[in-house]
Image (tube, rainbow, N blue to C red):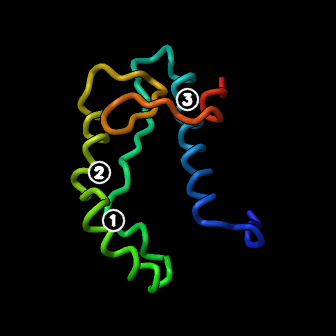
């Protein structure tokens, strides 16, 4: 994709999350007759190396938040573990904080 003229990391992050939600719904639709459950999981904002590509001065500003507001990686993994271990999930669902969460209207309108 030739996105260099208008590439914006935050906008691309949002588009990638929308793509995951749409893809999850489509895979759930295609596997409806099988014994398969497909879920999208949002771990929340966790203190990982996600910010390794931002400028150093941004990291200096962000560092205090990484250790006070953001989740630890282990805490961020809890929703994923819940979806792996739970028996009562909705296939095609979007899970956040270990609960079924309604994704954006753009993701919901896909059939």
**Mark drawn on residue 78:** none
Q: Indicate which label's residue lies in the foreground, 1 or 3.
A: 1
Q: Indicate which label's residue lies in the foreground, 2 or 3.
A: 2
Residue that badge 3 annotates: 25
Secondary element at tag 1 = loop
Residue 53: horizontal and vertical position, in percent?
48, 76
Residue 9: horizontal and vertical position, in percent?
59, 65
Mark 3 packing: few (<14 Cα in 10 Å), some, or many (20+)?
many
Mark 1 packing: few (<14 Cα in 10 Å), some, or many (20+)?
few
Please report whichever mark, 2 or 3, sits nearer to the chain's N-terminal start. 3
Give the quadrant of the C terminus: top right
Separation (CA) of disc 2 from disc 3: 23 Å
| Residue 69 appears left or right of 39 | left
Please give the name of the residue rendered at 40% of the width and 78% of the height, measured from the top-left corner. Answer: 61
Residue that badge 1 annotates: 48
The number of numbered badges drawn on the structure is 3
Separation (CA) of disc 1 from disc 3: 27 Å
Residue 95 vs 65, above or below: the answer is above
Outermost residue, top side: 33
Residue 76 vs 92, above or below: the answer is below
Secondary element at tag 3 = helix
Separation (CA) of disc 1 from disc 2: 9 Å
Residue that badge 2 annotates: 76
Residue 21: horizontal and vertical position, in percent?
54, 38
* Quadrant hosting residue 79: top left
Circles 1 and 2 in contact, beta carbons < 8 Å: yes
Please report whichever mark, 1 or 2, sits nearer to the chain's N-terminal start. 1
Please report whichever mark, 1 or 3, sits nearer to the chain's N-terminal start. 3
The foreground one among 37 and 21 is 21
């Amino acid at each position: 994709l030739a996105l260099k003229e208008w590439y914006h990391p935050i906008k691309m992050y949002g588009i990638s999350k929308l793509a995951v939600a749409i893809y999850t719904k489509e895979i759930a639709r295609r596997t409806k007759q099988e014994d398969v459950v497909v879920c999208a999981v949002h771990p929340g904002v966790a203190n990982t190396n996600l910010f390794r590509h931002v400028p150093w001065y941004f990291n200096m500003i962000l560092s205090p938040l990484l250790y006070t507001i953001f989740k630890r990686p282990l805490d961020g993994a809890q929703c994923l573990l819940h979806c792996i271990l739970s028996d009562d999930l909705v296939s095609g669902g979007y899970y956040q904080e270990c609960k079924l969460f309604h994704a954006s209207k753009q993701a919901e309108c896909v059939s």
